[in-house]
Image (cartoon, grey):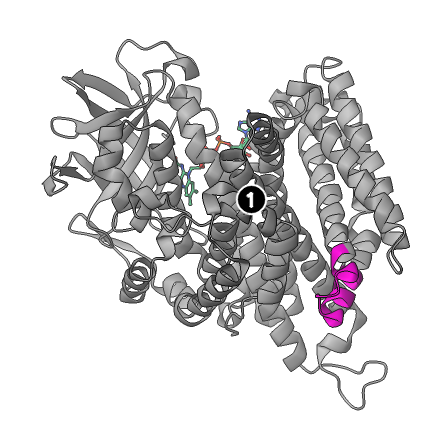
Amino acid sequence: MSNYAPPLDDINFCLRHLSGIDEILSLDAFDGIEVADLEQIIGEAGRFARDVIAPTNVIGDQQGVRLEDGKVLVPDAIADLHAQFVANGWQSVAGNPEFGGMGLPSAVANAVSEMVETGNLAYSLLPMLTHDGAIALEAHGTEEQKARFLSKLITGEWSGTMLLTEPQAGSDLAAVKTRAVPDGDRYRIFGTKIFITWGDHELSENIIHFVLARVEGAPEGVRGISMFLVPKFEVGDDGAIGERNDVRATSVEHKLGIHVSPTCVMSFGDDDGAIGYLLGEENKGLANMFTMMNHARLGVGLQGLAVSERAYQQACAYANDRVQGKAPGVEGRAPIIHHADVRRMLMLMRSQIEAMRAVAYSAAAEIDHSHHASGEETRQAAEARLSLLTPIVKGWCTEKSEEITSLGVQIHGGMGYVEETGAAQHYRDARILTIYEGTSGIQANDFAGRKTLGDEGRELGRLIAELREMAQELGNQQGLGDVAKSISEGLDLLEKGARWIVDKAMSHPAAVGAAAFNYMMLAGTVLGGAYLAKAAGIASSDESVDEEFAAAKRATSAFYCAHVLPRAHGYLAAMTADPGITMAIPAEAFAD
Ligand SMILES: Cc1cc2nc3c(=O)[nH]c(=O)nc-3n(C[C@H](O)[C@H](O)[C@H](O)COP(=O)(O)OP(=O)(O)OC[C@H]3O[C@@H](n4cnc5c(N)ncnc54)[C@H](O)[C@@H]3O)c2cc1C
């Protein structure tokens, strides 16, 4: 079983050149912060992830969580880890300094989060949801609410949760039934939420629940949903912890992976109703909750990258160690890393991980620009780009994580299928990523519907044009001509896909729905390749970049173009097939 060595060379490279950290640091909000300070912070985060977080991964998987006497209990190792995480300030990296945060760019927090997530995916959900809750509170809370709750979330002394799902309301949040009854200037909340990540635990003094509920008499559907803040313990005007609120975990789920993340059924209002505070306006709750959800979607996409990196490192270690058969150029029996098919699998893992990192770090930069760029127009352009890329980061990176963690098992042979090596844990842990925070189907609908049809493909068109220009310049660089050509062809395929969505959306009732998944995968495959090629171009032309690193980037992008990018043809063919083919067998005929 291998430990984790953070790939700091690629993380720092992507932060510098894909997130464009120098440009971010030139924004007024980050005045006085130097790149060298950031590299030091990234290095420290890497050490913490390697030495403190990563060793808890297997313990967490094996020991899991339990509900005893109304308390959700996690292994001591996780409690110790969380105490250190908070004490060392890792929760507050991108937090607003007015409320106790470090005020560093989100692009930096993104790099730190990757390493935390690779260290222990199940644990990482606790800081992730706390951070995302703080962002929602900052965006939609009143000054009084922020004064009372925000700094404790930003520092991580308290934790945050997101409560949307109910038995009848999963992907379809219009069906939310949890009730909010006005009670003076607050509300009493009644209902049941299911599948709530880190819904309860004893690791922090208080837990702040961000809850979707319906005020009595509100319209049906999404237009009648409001967002509430419900603390586990009441908080006095002086900030002191008060009485236990009427919200409890009534069970924890037994599940395939992420065993140390408690997935709770939460019951509100078994007695007088849980006291809740309206966040933002009544009936505007879903839009406000999207502030939290969009950050969580980027976070879950990053989890796809993170768990893939862990599976890759483990597979590399095993492939170097395991001796089996003979290989050309190797005397005697060879470590399996010398077999071309094993190398094919390792390269599939590595090149796609690098492509995912390139996409995710490019997207993260847009968070900083959308908040802090000096002109309104620039901020809006960044917001549009971030919004376009969010379903790709979430949908494509998590789909890739299933392929990559599965390859990790395959490289281990039979030892991957048994639990002992740990390869199986990454595969099991990754399986949730395409489901929670909006399934791949929902991400694909978002990308095809709101993000493409919504503006008739204009924002995607702008991105394709920028990347085409990049590919053209890349064509002049030695050793990257073939990569540049493949990327240009890939961008043509993506453009065709987008045009099909815009032109054929009304051609059949199922046109967009039947095409959406393949369209999202087409976009992820092409954009991933393009951002990876961009990285190879920069690495090859920047003299400060180590030549070995640059040569490896050229090799991974060439492999990606040869082995992964051709899948774009298949995705385009499938998405543009007659939607009638998908719907040909009537629903009744699938009955058992
Ligand atoms: C471990 C775990 C942790 C979770 N954590 C949280 C949490 O912290 N907070 C929270 O609120 N929820 C959480 N969830 C719930 C999670 O977000 C939902 O499970 C997810 O959104 C899917 O909803 P569902 O399970 O009801 O599936 P369904 O909505 O029933 O979907 C079933 C299938 O139908 C497809 N489908 C449904 N509608 C459409 C459509 N319109 N178009 C195309 N396909 C569609 C889906 O893609 C999926 O394949 C968690 C779930 C799990 C398992």
Residue 355 % position (x, y): 68, 52
Q: Amino acid at mark 1?
A: Ala
Question: Residue 88 versus residue 117: which sits nearer the camera?
Answer: 88
Image position of 343 (left or right of 91): right
Image position of 121 (left or right of 571): left
Task: Using the image, determine if residue 8 lies above or below residue 210.
Answer: below
Image position of 24 (left or right of 18): left
- In the rendered image, which quarter is residue 212 located in? top left
- Determine the secondary structure under disc 1: helix
Question: Residue 247 versus residue 70: which sits nearer the camera?
Answer: 247
Task: Give the prevailing secondary structure in the magenta stretch.
Answer: helix
Whether residue 569 is visible, yes or no, is yes
Q: Is mark 1 within 8 Å of ligand 1?
A: no
- In the rendered image, which quarter is residue 245 located in? top left
The magenta stretch spans residue 547: yes
Residue on which disc 1 sits: 364
The magenta stretch spans residue 299: no
Residue 184 % position (x, y): 14, 17
Q: What residue range appears in magenta?
A: 538-556
The residue depicted at 73 percent of the width and 30 percent of the height is 462
Q: Residues within 10 Å of mark 1 (few under 14, many from 20)?
A: many
Total marks in image: 1
The residue depicted at 81 percent of the width and 86 percent of the height is 330
The residue depicted at 56 percent of the width and 29 percent of the height is 375
Residue 564 % position (x, y): 77, 51
Whether residue 199 is visible, yes or no, is no
Instruction: Looking at this view, name the residue that lies furthest to the left.
Output: 243
Task: Using the image, determine if residue 216 lies above or below residue 590.
Answer: above
